[in-house]
């Protein structure tokens, strides 16, 4: 942490108010974890026990041990508040007794599962609201929370875990709370899960295949670390504001890049991006809007807008801040952002400009004790001609000066007629009126011109000797100088106030428009409504025609146009498609496909480009003015976020439908599998009771074979449900593949009758570590598939071999082979290959073989053999090879 400067600033009233509120309430400490099982409850109880030994009044309000012995052991010696019982739908449930905890009024209450939803009829629907009431009563609370329960992260986490968490807490609960991260590497958490320390074995096996995969846990861990760091950083800034301490207090780097109208602003942005990436730091791009900004030409405004747009694209926070001057504006932003690094371009101003206004770079370097200032050279592209044009444009229009002369002439006439009544001493005050009016209406420089003209008119018409510019009386000289000075100062103040008022009004209008636009997007219930709202608002605010295009059935088409009759040509369509595919603007004024009459902007999100916005003007001029480019970028950004939100909502709805369909299918298959077993057992017993002398005895072998096939089909149904439910339990052991194949051949001896088995599994093949029962199922289904599709009496090859990095086991038939492109689809549930109708294939055997193989870490692949037939290969990787048998000499 950097050393704070000795100077202090005035404490922030908002920060003081937040601190006062915290002092009146209890303190909240959140034990934050990436996932269940990292040890949040254990860590909370440990700290509670230590505090109790130190004399703190601690009670356990509610704790869920989930049957973990080490957690239950920590409850020994703790005072536990009895839970209240609630009758709900014929069941007796228990909840934290909030009133009992309030009556007990301990110093510290331990409340587990912060995001818990209370039983219907409780005082508060959520446990975090119960905690808020305890805090309001002055009771400190320790609680636990998993990162997936944070409201703002809910959609993001659901997108990669495919699990939508319904119990969430608002992000506001982190304000003022102490965060303790309970961290555990993914591999250790997976080991705890396998050892049954998180869930019971059946639930643990299912969790490992779904939510608790290593990629999921790694992502959740990173999000928990980031949230904890963010909370600590925000708490530090709040404390600094409350104490009125200036300085950066650089617990982490924060980068600020200053964008000006000079050439080279884009280079500053790229430099800031590289520095931010290197330091893993947040960064902000800011443009300080001063009264001088009113005189910028279109090229200067376009450079500012382009630089801010580039910064936003590269991940920066962007802002345009009105200020009296650049130095004051940047100092305010450095203070507000607590910036530790400032990137600014080397000035191209003349010495005369810096003499009058001061050097921004030098002033900031001299006044910054804890700020690293990076001064980046700017390209020498400004020409003297451009400088003279800018200087002349800063003086305004000739009509302003003519108006000033007319006002002064009118004031002179008025003064001539009123002088006998008011005297010469009051005449000079009359000349302040045209000066103030001119400065207010036309700006600073016309106002200064009016002040000089007023002084000369007063001298010529009212000071002796009259009608000359000579001043005879020394007192009149002083009067003249005072009039000129007062007029100049008044003109300066009026001109600056006028400019600042215009900037303020424009900023207020844009902010109000953006707020209204955000509300419109929030109310939009589908993507078409969002597109309509976007086009209507862009068209209204920028005065342009607007279209929105999106992809449907692989074709990018027009979905909304404002006005409704607006159309696009084939050239425009090409520009829109380029913007869609590249994610960059295209069309008029962009440098790509300039022949288009429209300018197209992609709506880019973390999911990719979701739509394309097109704008154009009726007069074929530039679609958007340079000073409106930032507003357009903000509108496009809000529209992109709205489209992303709706897209994710659609995905989650689709996922919910699929999950419900899979659940119903699993329930149906399980019911069929189990309900048919009993009658099947009865039929089998009846057939076996038929003697050989029975008239139908010759049909018994066929009946037995069909019953065996039906029994395998039911077994496959049940196993399929187990795979889908994540209920496959592994019992790993060393297995001899020779014995495994021999066992399958024995079990299928009736089915294999008449088929030649080419058995080439060498006796010295290494043992593999696997689940013998599941491997038997895999081989059973693969060999049965070879029989069904290999033709009558077709030979079947079973070959085992050792490669440098794996053991391979292949089953090959001599049938028609796989259909073209079906090498992967053949493993889908109910997928059926060639001849399935003739051979009675159910489409389940290969799906089960694939599911069991994946669970065991074995790769199963299908292909067509070069000499005909299909070949299925089991790849046992190196980590599953557990023993080698020496080759015989």
Image (cartoon, rainbow, N blue to C red):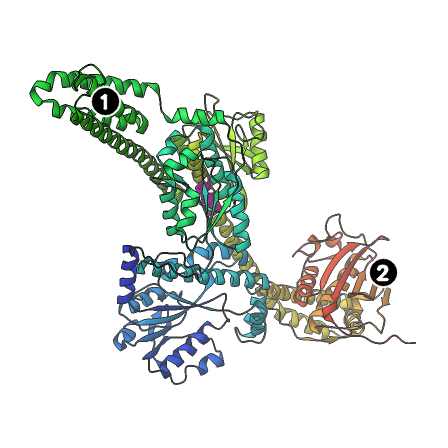
**Quadrant location of the C terminus in the rendered image:** bottom right
Q: Nearer the viewer, residue 776 or 617?
A: 617
Residue that sits furthest to the top in the current view: 467
Residue 850 appearing in the image:
yes
**Quadrant location of the N terminus in the rendered image:** bottom left
**Circle nearer the N terminus (1, 2):** 1
Tag nearer the camera, 1 or 2: 1
**Rendered location of residue 757, percent (x, y):** 85, 65
**Rendered location of residue 481, percent (x, y):** 22, 28
Residue shown at 9% from the left, 22% from the top: 423
Task: Indicate which disc residue 231 carries.
Answer: none
Residue that sits furthest to the left in the current view: 421
Find disc 2 in the rendering and name its residue.
793
Residue 170 appearing in the image:
no
Report whether 40 appears left or right of 186: left
Is the stretch drawn in magenta largely helix, strand or loop?
Answer: helix
Q: Is residue 311 magenta?
A: no
Dot 1, crowdedness within 10 Å: few (<14), some or many (≥20)? many
Label tally: 2
Report whether 493 appears left or right of 180: left
**Rendered location of residue 796, percent (x, y):** 83, 62
Q: Is residue 639 magenta?
A: yes
**Rendered location of residue 652, percent (x, y):** 50, 52
Q: Is residue 561 above or below residue 343?
A: above
Task: Indicate which disc residue 454 carries.
Answer: 1
Q: Is residue 4 above or below residue 688?
A: above
Residue shown at 49% from the left, 36% from the top: 306
Residue numbers of the magenta segment = 636-646
Q: Nearer the viewer, residue 511 or 257?
A: 257
Q: Report if the CB atoms under discs 1 and 2 are less than 8 Å apart.
A: no
Q: Nearer the viewer, residue 112 or 278?
A: 278
Residue at disc 1, secondary structure: helix
């Amino acid at each position: 942490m950097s050393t704070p400067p000795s100077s202090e600033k005035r404490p922030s009233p908002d920060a003081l108010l937040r601190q006062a509120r915290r002092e009146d309430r209890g303190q909240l400490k959140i034990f934050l974890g990436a996932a269940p099982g990292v040890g949040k409850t254990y860590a909370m109880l440990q700290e509670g026990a230590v505090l109790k030994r130190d004399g703190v009044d601690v009670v356990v309000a509610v704790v869920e041990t989930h049957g973990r012995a080490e957690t239950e052991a920590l409850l020994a010696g703790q005072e536990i508040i009895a839970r209240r019982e609630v009758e709900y739908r014929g069941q007796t449930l228990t909840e934290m007794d909030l009133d009992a905890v309030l009556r007990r009024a301990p110093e510290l209450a331990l409340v587990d599962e912060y995001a818990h939803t209370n039983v219907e009829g409780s005082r508060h629907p959520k446990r975090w609201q119960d905690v808020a009431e305890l805090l309001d009563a002055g009771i400190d609370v320790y609680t636990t929370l998993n990162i997936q329960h944070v409201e703002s992260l809910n959609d993001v986490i659901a997108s990669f875990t495919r699990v939508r968490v319904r119990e969430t807490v608002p992000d506001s609960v982190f304000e003022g709370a102490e965060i303790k991260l309970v961290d555990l590497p993914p591999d250790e958490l997976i080991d705890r899960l396998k050892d049954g320390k998180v869930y019971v074995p059946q639930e643990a096996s299912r969790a490992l295949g779904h939510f608790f995969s290593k990629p999921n846990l790694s992502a959740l861990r990173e999000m928990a670390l980031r949230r904890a760091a963010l909370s600590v950083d925000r708490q530090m800034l709040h404390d600094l504001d409350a104490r009125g301490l200036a300085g950066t207090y650089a617990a982490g780097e924060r980068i600020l890049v200053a964008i000006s109208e000079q050439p080279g602003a884009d280079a500053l942005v790229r430099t800031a991006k590289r520095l931010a990436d290197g330091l893993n730091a947040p960064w902000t791009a800011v443009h300080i809007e001063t009264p001088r900004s009113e005189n910028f030409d279109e090229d200067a405004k376009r450079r500012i807008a382009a630089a801010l747009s580039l910064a936003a694209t590269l991940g920066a926070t962007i802002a345009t801040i009105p200020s009296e001057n650049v130095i004051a504006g940047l100092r305010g932003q450095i203070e507000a952002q607590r910036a530790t690094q400032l990137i600014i371009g080397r000035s191209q101003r003349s010495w005369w400009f810096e003499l009058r206004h001061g050097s921004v770079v030098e002033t900031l370097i001299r006044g910054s004790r804890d700020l690293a200032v990076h001064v980046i050279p700017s390209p020498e592209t400004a020409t003297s001609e451009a400088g003279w044009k800018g200087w002349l444009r800063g003086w305004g229009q000739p009509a302003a000066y003519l108006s000033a002369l007319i006002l002064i002439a009118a004031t002179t006439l008025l003064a001539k007629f009123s002088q006998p009544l008011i005297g010469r001493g009051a005449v000079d005050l009359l000349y302040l009126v045209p000066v103030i009016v001119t400065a207010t209406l036309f700006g600073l420089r016309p106002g200064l011109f009016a002040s000089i003209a007023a002084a000369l008119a007063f001298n010529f018409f009212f000071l002796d000797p009259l009608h000359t510019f000579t001043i005879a009386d020394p007192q009149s000289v002083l009067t003249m100088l005072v009039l000129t000075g007062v007029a100049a100062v008044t003109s300066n103040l009026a001109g600056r106030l006028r400019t600042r008022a215009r900037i303020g009004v424009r900023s207020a209008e844009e902010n109000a428009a953006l707020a209204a636009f955000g509300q419109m997007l929030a109310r939009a219930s589908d993507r078409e409504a969002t597109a309509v709202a976007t086009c209507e608002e862009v068209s209204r605010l920028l005065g342009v025609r607007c279209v929105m295009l999106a992809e449907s059935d692989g074709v990018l088409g027009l979905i909304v146009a404002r006005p409704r009759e607006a159309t696009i040509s084939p050239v425009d369509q090409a520009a829109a498609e380029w913007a869609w595919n590249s994610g960059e603007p295209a069309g008029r004024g962009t440098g790509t496909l300039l022949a288009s009459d429209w300018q197209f902007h992609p709506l880019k999100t973390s999911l990719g480009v979701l739509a394309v916005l097109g704008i154009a003007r009726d007069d074929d001029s530039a679609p958007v003015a340079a000073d409106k480019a930032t507003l357009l970028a903000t509108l496009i950004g809000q529209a992109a976020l709205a489209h992303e939100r709706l897209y994710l909502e659609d995905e989650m709805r689709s996922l919910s439908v699929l999950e419900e369909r899979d659940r119903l299918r699993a329930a149906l298959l399980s019911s069929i599998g189990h309900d048919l077993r009993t009658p099947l057992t009865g039929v089998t017993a009846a057939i076996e009771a038929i003697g050989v002398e029975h008239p139908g005895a010759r049909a018994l072998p066929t009946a037995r074979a069909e019953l065996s096939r039906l029994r395998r089909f039911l077994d496959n149904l049940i196993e399929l449900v187990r795979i889908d439910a994540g209920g496959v339990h592994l019992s790993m052991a060393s297995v001899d593949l020779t014995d495994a194949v021999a066992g399958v051949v024995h079990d299928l001896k009736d089915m294999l009758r008449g088929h030649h088995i080419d058995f080439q599994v060498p006796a010295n093949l290494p043992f593999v570590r696997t689940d013998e029962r599941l491997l038997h199922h895999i081989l059973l289904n693969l060999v049965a598939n070879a029989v069904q599709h290999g033709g009558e009496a077709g030979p079947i090859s079973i070959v085992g071999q050792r490669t440098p990095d794996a053991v391979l086991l292949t089953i090959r038939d001599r049938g028609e082979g796989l259909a073209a492109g079906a090498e992967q689809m053949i493993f889908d549930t109910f997928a059926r290959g060639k001849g399935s109708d003739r051979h009675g294939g159910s489409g389940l055997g290969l799906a089960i073989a694939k599911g069991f193989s994946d669970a065991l870490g074995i790769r199963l692949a299908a292909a067509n053999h070069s000499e005909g037939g299909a070949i299925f290969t089991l790849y046992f990787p190196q980590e599953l090879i557990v023993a080698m048998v020496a080759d015989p000499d």
